[in-house]
Image: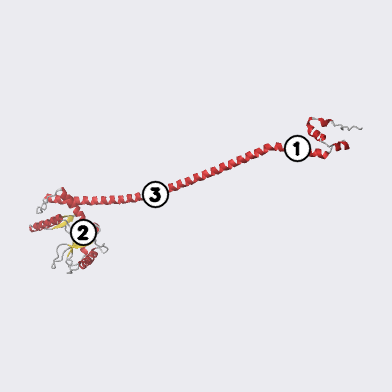
Amino acid sequence: MNVVRTPPQSPNTCKEGNRDSIAIASGLDMSEKIGGSQPDLRKITLSENTNQITFRAKRKQPHDDLGAQFEKFQTRMETLMIDMAKTQTENLNKIAQEVSSIKEQIGQIKVITDLLSSEQGKIKLELINISGFRTNIEEKVKTIENELVTIKSGSTTAITKPSFSYEDFISETYERAKREKNIIIRGITEIRSLNSEERLSYDTEEVMKIMKMAVPDCTKPIKTIRIGKYNPDIPRPIKIILPTSEAAKSILRNKSKIKVNNIKLYSDETPYQQKYRNNLRNELKRRLEGGEKDLTIKYINGVPKITKIQPKN
């Protein structure tokens, strides 16, 4: 009986690092051992490749963990970037709204500034008007003072000396300033008509004809009224009220250009001025009858006075 012997193994086969190869060799079926002393190399190669693949797969696990962590990090960064972008957008929208609100406030401030500037201009005009009115009042005060000095000087002894209180003085000054815009016209015929509008229309047309003789570009009167009670035999004088005192003064300065019979123009005087002028005329008559010559009434600084007639050169 022949004994089956195990083929001799090389020294490398018994090393610690080749345990897998030994296990493969011991697992060979008996037919292969009986048929030859060499193992099947195809099976050995397949076993080695399987072990190598398993080993490599185990070594790749750390790389997979890093990839997952990177993906999580990337996701977190994307989320953070989206949140930052959203916050920035909200901040920009708030800034835009605040800028728009500031623009509106600036616009309102500009409107208020323009209104204040306009009001300031109006105030300046009012101050100028007040200054002009004050100057006018000062002139009237000087005129009244000159009249009082004339009365006290005794040059017109026949003139009745009025008694003036402070209230009378203020009232007289105001009344003269108000009447400066008025003119009295005497001599315009008065039509007989029961229609008041027809009478008024006639008076206005006649007044305009006379005024244009003195000042061709004169302004239309604000109001035209007849003074006194109606008398069919004697036409009543007409009072015309003009827009400004300058318009009235201009017509009175040029009244000599009016070449119409029986038409006379006068300034609208206060009762005190009328009384003073009548007394002055009486004084002039008395002095002329007393032997004085070359005397006349002349307005000096707006005050009527008896003066000597200057000889013409």
Determine whether, in the image, residue 229 is placed left or right of residue 37.
left
Please identify, in this view, whether the residue under mark 3 or under mark 1 is nearer the observer: 1
Amino acid on which disc 3 is placed: Gln
- For residue 266, the mark is none
In-image side of 221 versus 34 (left or right): left
- The residue that label 3 is drawn on is 108
Local packing at callout 3 (Cα closer than 10 Å; few below 14, some 14-19, many 20+) is few
Measure the C-alpha gap from mark 3 to mark 1.
84 Å
Quadrant in the rendering for residue 308:
bottom left
Residue 279 figure quarter: bottom left
Nearest to N terminus: mark 1 or mark 2:
1
Question: Considering the image in quadrants, where does the N terminus appear?
Answer: top right
Task: Please give the residue where the numbered disc 2 appears in the rendered image.
Answer: 182
Q: Position of residue 299 (x, y in %)?
A: 17, 56
Q: Is residue 165 visible?
A: yes
Instruction: Say which residue appears at 65% left-offset and 38% top-offset.
Output: 66
Amino acid tagged 2: Asn
Dot 1, crowdedness within 10 Å: few (<14), some or many (≥20)? few
Amino acid type assigned to the residue bearing label 1 in the image: Gln
**Between 30 and 170, which is closer to the camera in this rendering?**
30
Number of the label disc, if any, that sits on residue 52: 1
Q: Nearer the viewer, residue 50 or 61?
A: 50
Q: Residues within 10 Å of mark 2 (few under 14, many from 20)?
A: many
